[in-house]
Image (spheres, rainbow, N blue to C red):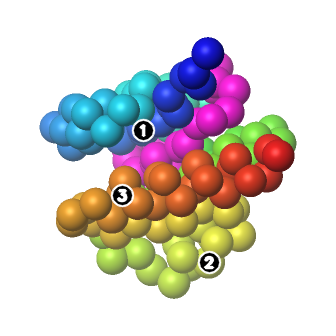
């Protein structure tokens, strides 16, 4: 029996980017749940591992880091990637403290996919 493909929880309020990333990630074999806001994420029942969060930092309402901080306070340590443009040092510091890897926009080449793969490998190593 083969293992199910990893799930990516994608949270971005930009519908065009969310749609494009969903399409790309599904082509790469992931199951993608796309959500339009941080509030949607906090109300969503997260899947069991293997799964990875991909959070946009700059959304209306809760930011990606706001969401991640809340999830961490709930003892959810799912791997997380933060996508953003030109992050300030305070964003970098907070992301690091919350265990998130920053992937800077524009998302060029396979940078996002490489970071997702690395995060899922780290998660698998922590589960064994």
Q: Which residue is mark 1?
A: 11
Q: Residue lying furthest front in this view?
A: 1
Residue 73: image location, x then y, percent:
80, 46
Q: Nearer the viewer, mark 3 or mark 1?
A: 3
Position of residue 54 relative to residue 90, above or below, is above
Residue 47 magenta-highlighted = yes
Can residue 97 be spotted in the picture?
A: yes
Q: Quadrant of the N terminus?
A: top right
Image position, residue 19 (x, y; %)? 22, 32
Circle 1: element type: strand
Taking the spot 80% from the left edge, 44% from the top edge, the residue there is: 127
Mark 3 touches mark 1? (CB < 8 Å): no
Q: Residues within 10 Å of mark 2 (few under 14, many from 20)?
A: few
- Residue hosting label 3: 112
Which quadrant of the structure image shows residue 13?
top left
Say the numbered circle drawn on residue 93.
2
Q: Is residue 124 left or right of residue 81?
A: right
Q: Residues within 10 Å of mark 3 (few under 14, many from 20)?
A: many
Q: Which is the main secondary structure of the residues drawn in magenta?
A: loop
In the picture provided, is 92 more to the left or to the right than 111? right
**Label 3's element?**
helix
Question: Residue 64: x and y, percent?
Answer: 50, 51
Q: Which residues are magenta?
A: 45-65
Q: CA distance from mark 3 to mark 1?
A: 14 Å
Residue 70 to residue 114: above or below: above
Query: Which residue is depicted at the point 41% across and 32% down?
Result: 30
Question: Is 63 included in the stretch rendered in magenta?
Answer: yes
């Amino acid at each position: 029996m083969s293992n199910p493909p990893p799930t990516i929880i994608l949270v971005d309020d930009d519908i065009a980017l969310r749609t494009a990333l969903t399409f790309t990630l599904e082509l790469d074999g992931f199951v993608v749940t796309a959500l339009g806001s941080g509030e949607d994420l906090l109300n969503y029942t997260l899947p069991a591992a293997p799964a990875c969060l991909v959070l946009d930092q700059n959304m209306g309402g809760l930011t990606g880091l706001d969401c991640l901080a809340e999830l961490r306070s709930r003892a959810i340590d799912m791997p997380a990637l933060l996508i953003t443009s030109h992050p300030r040092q305070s964003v970098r510091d907070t992301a690091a403290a919350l265990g998130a890897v920053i992937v800077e926009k524009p998302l060029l080449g396979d940078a996002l996919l490489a970071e997702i793969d690395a995060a899922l490998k780290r998660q698998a190593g922590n589960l064994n």
